[in-house]
Amino acid sequence: MEKNRVTLEKRGTFALVCVDNPPVNAISRDVRAGLITVLRQIAVDPDIAAIILYCAGRTFIAGADIAEFASMQPLAADIHELFDLIENCGRPVVAALHGTALGGGLELALVCNFRVALRSARIGLPEVRLGLLPGGGGTQRLPRLAGAKTALKIILTGVQVPADKALALGIIDEVVDGDLLEAAIAYTERVLSAGCTLRRASALSVNPDSVSADLFKQARQALAQRPNGNPAPARIITCVEAAVTQPFEQGMATEQRLFAECLRSPASAALRHRFFAEREVTKIPGLVVNLPLRPIQRVGVVGAGTMGGGIAMNFVNAGIPVVIVEASQAALDRGLSIVRKNYEATAAKGRITGEQIKQYMGRLSGSLDYADLADCDLVIEAVFEDMELKKRVCAQLSKICKPGAIIASNTSTLDVDVLAEAYGRSANVLGMHFFSPANVMRLLEVVRGAKTAPDVLATVVKLARTIGKVPVVSGMCHGFIGNRMAESYLRESERLLLEGATPQQVDAAVQSLGMPMGPFRMLDMAGVDVVAKVALEQGKNGLLPLDPCYQAVVLKLMELGRYGQKSGRGFYRYEGRTPMADPIVGKICTELASRHGIAYRDDISAQEIIERCFYPLINEAAKILEEGIAYRPGDIDVVWINGYGFPDYLGGPLFWADTLGLANIAARIDHYAVQLGNAYGYWHRAALLMRLADQGRGFSDLTADELNHAHG
Ligand code: CAA
Ligand code: NAI
């Protein structure tokens, strides 16, 4: 049933039209219908001299309702009917903007004759991030107001432009402070008395000074240098070019045609999936909504190494004071100086000021005394990956930390429940698995222990958003969600080397899928020694498969001191930071292969590499879902997009798997089980994968009930 989302109030001769569609006033079907009804009413009311369009709640219209795109045929015709009604209503229409006027919201504002914005407002056309282009005339009106070059930049990047800047660019007409509606009314009165009423963006032509001879050629060249699977950027260039070269109506037709192409593309469906999945991750099944959260006003970090310093920066940047506790003065000094250097490097790029460095460093203190953690609301330990050491640290914290303090471990492999026991008050303990560099990477795996209290989990998930992370909750298992899946990916890529593939060949195949770097460049960057030590540690705990070739190459390279980029040699040799093929690696692999009786092949195709690296990873993800380690397939996609650079235009490994068809993946897994033998169970299909494949369903077809069943 249609909901009334639009109200009309007559104040004197002004029609005040208000959109109220929480949470972000998306211009959904109901809103469009409401606006059309109200505008038709106004059209037959001769007393109305002007219209002011504004929104209730936290923001002006933040765009089309993205959920509607799943069924939209191409862009609903009623949006154009609405825009025509506004443009031809014969009275000045003023849009009053606050919050974020984005996408279809900004396009609607551009159809209005004037735009007044609160100083805190921001505008933008972020459709490109959804694999779309602005389909409501944005590619035609924005260049006419702001020039082709500026419009191209805004639409290609999807940035949010602050009101002051939008004013300077000619996109809005006035920036105001205080009461927006009153200011918009006053502005409209001035417009009427000045007699300049019906200015239309569509009637302007693009300022020729804003179109250099090679603007579009350069934009296309820049795109060709950074190819990706997003269909929108190339089409955006064509549309903005059309705004310059074609009359308005023809440019609109071009925009419509290319918008429809984008909307139909699998990449747009994948990017829209990412949009919603990244927002769903904070919804924790079974948790009481609006659970009171614990206040986090001061944070402690134990260990100022690679991770500790970066972790501290996140909180400092968000205005939360941090104390870092170290074991030695030298380590503390080193850690703090790296943090300072990081800020200085950011300042050198003009992204922060010297004053901000002072503020940030002022919020950060160092100490050698655990007692300084006594008043912290959250303490994150980031000491060496050593269970005994971490247990000692937790036991020490239990004597010092205040009763309600949350204790988090940044461990990448160890059992959070054992640490919780060492701390004592287990309900207050969980994992916060940051990714390196911790101040840059958006992903944060929040590891719930068996006894973690619901409000502790909810507090940390909320806090993660505050510090700009995308939190994904994981249950306890070795490697959590991300590294557990990465294990099968790395295992299989190594095995390909033993069969005769080269690191370059494997990396190139994986990169052709859109991964920013292949497994061997990644291992060289992370440190071959780091990965080898994890395998050795697992071996000591009896957690490795009985496979004698398991990580044989990594272990051999470590033995030879080939630690990767940091030692100048690993799977590659490095000239500066450039990886070069190193024939020694081929020899090492040939020797290992003959020792383990693995036959050489010269017929390994890029397709086989992709299947063998990614299908076991997808299979592992199915196990992660059936064990209830992850709440939803989308959570797994979010982990791999934000933590491992999986191409977002494929939507993450599980969204991609659905597009390939799970029955096809299951058949290929069976094929490799036969081709390679399945002595160690690497190619056993997950029960969930088998079930879905048999039923002709995908991961995205899993119902909430099926998923809830898995995590109890
Ligand atoms: N459609 C549907 N739902 C939307 C939405 C949209 N355009 N924008 C936000 N939402 C939903 C989110 O899914 C979220 O829902 P839940 O609370 O159920 O998870 C809720 O609104 C709040 O969103 P955020 O958590 O993102 O809130 P925020 O305050 O951090 O950010 C925002 C607000 C800046 C508006 C951000 O939501 C955003 O960037 N939205 C997308 C804007 C966009 O891409 N607009 C273009 C749409 S395409 C278009 O308009 C095509 C066209 O040409 C006509
Ligand atoms: P690191 O070796 O760079 O730093 C560890 C720091 O802990 C050192 O500065 C050391 O002096 C300090 N320390 C040791 N014992 C201490 C004690 N008793 N009290 C106070 N400080 C002490 O290690 P890194 O890489 O920062 O790793 C830390 C943790 O983060 C580990 O658990 C690791 O598994 C995890 N992690 C590491 C990632 C990485 O890429 N480096 C990624 C994600 C997690």
Image (spheres, grey):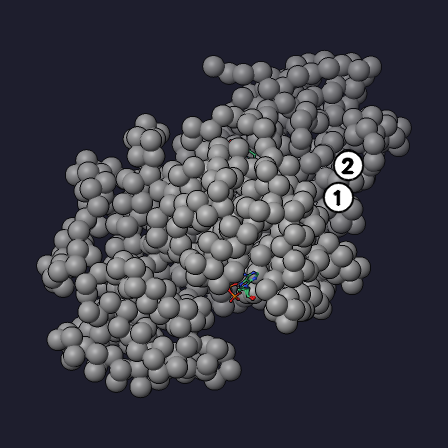
- Left or right of residue 69, residue 200 in this image: right
- Left or right of residue 710, residue 694 in this image: left
Residue under circle 1? Answer: 163
Residue displayed at 31% across by 74% down: 555
| Cβ–Cβ under 8 Å for marks 1 and 2 | yes
Residue displayed at 72% across by 46% down: 162
- Left or right of residue 284, residue 98 in this image: right
- Kindly state the secondary structure of the residue where label 1 is placed: helix
Residue displayed at 63% across by 72% down: 330
Q: Is residue 180 above or below residue 320?
A: above
Return the disc, 1 or 2, that comes first in the chain's sequence: 2
Q: Amino acid at mark 2?
A: Leu
Q: Amino acid at mark 1?
A: Ala
Mark 1–mark 2 distance (CA, rounded to whole Å): 7 Å
**Crowding at mark 1 (Cα within 10 Å: few <14, some 14-19, many 20+):** many
Between 30 and 628, the residue placed more toward the observer is 628
* Residue 373 seen anywhere in this rendered image of the structure: yes
Question: Residue 409 location, x and y as percent?
Answer: 49, 51
Question: Residue 463 location, x and y as percent?
Answer: 59, 42
Residue displayed at 55% across by 46% down: 398
Between 256 and 380, the residue placed more toward the observer is 380
Residue under circle 2? Answer: 118
Can you name the residue that lies furthest to the front here? 399
**Crowding at mark 2 (Cα within 10 Å: few <14, some 14-19, many 20+):** many
Dividing the picture into quadrants, the one containing residue 623 is: top left
Between 173 and 466, the residue placed more toward the observer is 466
Question: Residue 40 location, x and y as percent?
Answer: 63, 17
Question: Residue 125 location, x and y as percent?
Answer: 60, 45
